[in-house]
Amino acid sequence: MINFYTMISERKRIISFSLFFFDILFTAVSFFIAYWVRDSLFKVGLYSIKTYLWLLLIIIPLWSLILYSMGLYRIERTYPTRTEILRLLKAVILGNLILGAIIFGLKFIYISRLLIGFFGIINLIMLVALRFLFHYGIDLLIENEELNVLIVGTGKGAKELANEIDSNKFFRMKVLGFISENPEINASVINDYPLLGTIKDLPKIMEQKVVDEVILALPRNRLAEFDDIFRYCDEMGVKTGVLLDPFSKMGSKVSIENLKGIPVLTFSATARNELALLSKRFLDISGSALLLLTSFPLFILIFILIKFTSKGPIFFRQIRCGLNGRRFVMYKFRTMLQEAESLKKDLVKMNELNGPVFKIKRDPRVTPIGSFLRRTSLDELPQLINVLKGDMSLVGPRPPLPEEVERYKRWQRRRLSMRPGITGLWQISGRNDVDFEEWMRLDLKYIDEWSFLNDIKIIFKTVPVVTSGKGAY
């Protein structure tokens, strides 16, 4: 038995990878053309092309992540041309802004701003042209290809499946009609598709018509009744698919994995796209490494301020819960008195947050320097080490204490299903001004709606929140 969606997925992967490959190739070519244009128009102030080639080491992975996060490789339905062009425009603008910020931050003043400007313009033109060529090429490749599909079943799932097949431009599939699982049904047309007969008529229908695939869209409790269909299609050499919608009320995403030839139906409440998650980890590594490098002088200054204003270690180490409850040591700059933990029991009654979290304004255990570090969130800089190690991410739910997790309600534990982060929806929504229940819901919303682009947006929104000190104490 071959799943209908397996073939769909394979074709999507081939088309998506091909488009991605040419996008990156055209982006690299755009850089060389931009250099040639800049050199031709303004011959002064430009070094040899070899001097700038290292920029491609930033541009290629950066553009890969941004183009992917913009949804430009989701081969579901063809986007309207204007929508696709707007997505490309946003991607190129965002890429150039980040590239410019990196160049400015590293103070590479020898890099021509005109070169970067020309690169952005030429890159956009080439990517848009590629999209038109690509769509035209796909149309030529599949012009004479058409797969005929029979759908066994007449329920809601069967009708939605027929609509999905017809709306998919890239695969040129044709729904021949429905086969009813109910011999007493009285209809000749369902959703504008012909009702060709009942299950007992299937052998005759398949002999009379060209059928490439039979898809069963039946209630799961009835699938076992139709084992003969699988056997018959197997003898005829016709592919058989099953519409898998057995737990429609679950919020989890459903996927099929292959373990040495054994199909495994997987339900996951978190992101399952490995490429997207790899992109997130790439951002974590590159971002944390860059921030650690550029903030090193700040580390030294904070180190000196803490060392000479209060007794105790420079860093505060605490066991926190990470991905799926894994425990790790989280690092922060120490902002409290050395005996803070022993004093906590006398302050529990002053807790200003509901739920298992302990927070109070004007905590008497906080040192003067610690108060400043907390307001500016500079105390969290050492967590970049946790991000680099893989314990945390730049963006994600905040890592809780083990004793807090022990008091979680069952629905709240799902926030542990993603790697914890330094910033997230909670931080940009008011931090300690948000009550515990809302905090948990914001974390679950982040998990349910996660995308690489959302991470980028949260990072940018974190900057004004941190500088304002809103909700920090």
Image (spheres, helix red, strand yellow):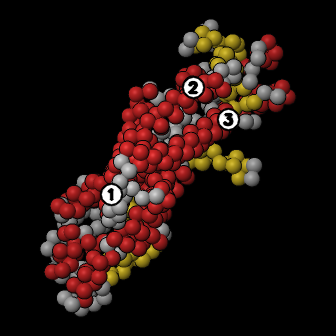
Residue that label 3 marks:
7
Near-viewer residue (290 or 324): 290
Q: Name the residue beneath numbered marker 2.
A: 136
Q: Is residue 74 left or right of residue 86?
A: right
Q: Is residue 411 above or below residue 121?
A: below
Q: Is residue 397 visible?
A: no
Earlier residue among tags 1 and 3? 3
**Does residue 82 lie above or below 400 as drawn?**
above
Residue 437, image quadrant: bottom left
Cα distance between the residues tagged 1 and 3 = 43 Å
Query: Could you give the CA–CA distance between mark 2 and mark 1, rounded to whole angstroms?
Result: 37 Å
Compared with residue 304, is residue 382 higher up or lower down, i.e. above or below?
above
Q: Which residue is mark 1?
A: 101
- Amino acid at pointer 2: Tyr
- Check disc 1 and give the amino acid type: Ala
Circle 1 SS class: helix
